[in-house]
Image (cartoon, rainbow, N blue to C red):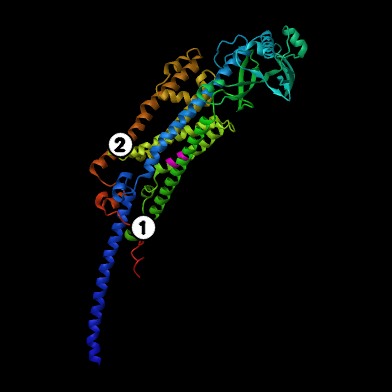
Amino acid sequence: MEDCEQLLTPRSEEARLNGHCRCGAHTQGLQAKVVEDFRRRLKYFFMNPCEKYKARGRKPWKLMLQILKIAIITVQLVSFGLSNEMMVTFKDENLMTFRHLFLKGYKDHRVGSYALYTKDDVYDHIYYIINTYTNLQNLTVGNLAYEMVDGEYTALSMCQEFYRNSSIDPGNETFDIDPHIEKECISIYPMQSFGNSSALLTHISFILDFKRLLSVSVNLTLKTINLQTVRHHELPDCYDFHIVITFDNRAHSGKIKVDVENDVRIYECRDWNVEGTSDKDDYLLLFFDSVVILACFASLILCTRSVVNGVQLQLEFNTFFHAYYNKIVSWSDRMEFVNGWYILIIVSDTLTIAGSALKIGIQTKYLTNYDVCSILLGTATMLVWVGVIRYLGFFKKYNILILTLRAAFPNVIRFCCCAAMIYLGYCFCGWIVLGPHHDKFRTLDKVTECLFSLINGDDMYATFLKMRDRSYMVWLFSRLYLYSFISLFIYMVLSLFIALITDTYETIKHHQQEKVPVSQLQAFIAECRDQPESGRYQTDEDSASCCVSPCCCFG
């Protein structure tokens, strides 16, 4: 019996070893299949819509939806743009009308240049404004009317602001002033008539102490209707113009600046009738805007799903690579799974949905946020058209532009941060030193605009010319300032900026010609030689995700 056991034992050990060899070979083969399936799955994920259609017969719904969106969003923007243009033009033309009506002798002056220099001129202009307002119906050629509240006309309000007490004697170089500001107002109702300025002053008892005077403001409200929209099959809106005419004497320099500003309220007219029209056009516009919202909502869902799938696949790839190769996936490789074009489309869809909802509110006269709506729709349309570049990137000749922009972006941002420090230094210096002597450097935002124009070679001679009549020291500093800025930014900073992009372009071009993978992810996918037409992709999408580590399937 013991002999039998001794004979059987070696045979049993040999059988066990053979079994383990067969199991090990089977395990290695299965692991190789898992790696190949996962590699094929990654390659399918990064295919373009046409290749995915060849690989699995999957129709490119997102591509077709984006093409549809480009068409309908552009049509929607053009339609709203025409309406918005009529509204803005009507507001600007009415503002110009108010300047010509209420500013005596106004001749289309440059904004901020209309000013008065004598007391008689100030009183004469105030009288002119009041007289024009009280006789407006007999003067204007427009459809202007007074505002009525509870059956009574709204009064014109004239207010003056002045220091509480002031005793100023420049001849003796003495002054005594109380900086607290007081305000005094009077009201004048329409349909009153005054023969001359003395009669007006007697009636209103409005005396100005110019030594203490800070400002005089005239506030009035007028109503009108924008009838030009009828020609474009749109319902006219009613407008309330809240007009403020300001006489600014805060500088006490002997120059009183006069300006006209208006605030507009747009709303649906109370009672209206347009012969030969129906609500059919309005309903069609509302239906079209609803179609745009539905298309963008569908696109938003599809793109969000794709982004989520990409993030999930990125997590699987990170786990897979660490389990099979004991390597950490770089951040740049992980970001390859997050498609920036989908994020761009998601942002565009969100803006379009919000803008379309606002547009519906404007068309139904519940809202009047034209500016907000135009910004939302304009930005959304811009992003939609920029997204077209993604589909051009499917062709190698166009794809190099996208790859260059993406690869150069980090270096460009770092370079711009460094250049911005120099640029801001010049901005602050120019604002402090040249601001009092040059209109283009008067405020910090004007300085930034002026210097940016100089970088692009715009308006150089006019900027130099404006400083010729200043003091020699300021003139000399302005020359050193402008010459150094232009030389530094045009000949050095811009050249380095272009060199950064050119160097990236050459690098990308070299990699494309040599067909060298530039990352671990691309090198891993490049080992898969299966073409989209091979039929090897007709498998369950999740079959390769069952095993992401060598030991998950084998106990």
* Span highlighted in magenta in the image: 344-349
Q: Residue at x 33, y 52 (%)?
A: 42
Q: Are marks 1 and 2 in contact (CB under 8 Å)?
A: no
Percent coordinates x, y for residue 441 in the rendering: 51, 22
Q: Residue furthest front?
A: 276
Towards the viewer: 359 or 278? 278
**Disc 2: CA contacts within 10 A as few (<14), some (14-19) or many (>=20):** some
Question: Is 196 left or right of 11, judged from the image as shown?
Answer: right
Dominant SS of magenta comes to: helix
Verify whether residue 209 appears in magenta: no
Percent coordinates x, y for residue 313 in the rendering: 38, 53
Residue assigned mark 2: 398
Above-or-below relation of 361 to 13:
above
Residue assigned mark 1: 542
Above-or-below relation of 231 to 375:
above
Residue 529 in sight in this render: no
Percent coordinates x, y for residue 319 in the rendering: 38, 58
Tell me which corner region of the image, top left, top right, bottom left or bottom right, holds residue 124. Answer: top right
In the rendered view of the protein, which quadrant contains the N terminus? bottom left
- Amino acid identity at mark 2: Tyr
Q: Residue at x 74, y 10 (%)?
A: 200
Towards the viewer: 442 or 531? 531
In the rendered view of the protein, which quadrant contains the C terminus? bottom left
Comparing labels 1 and 2, the label whose residue is closer to the camera: 1
Q: Earlier in the sequence, mark 1 or mark 2?
A: 2
- Amino acid identity at mark 1: Asp
Helix, strand, or loop for circle 1? loop
Towards the viewer: 139 or 205? 139
Label placed on residue 451 = none
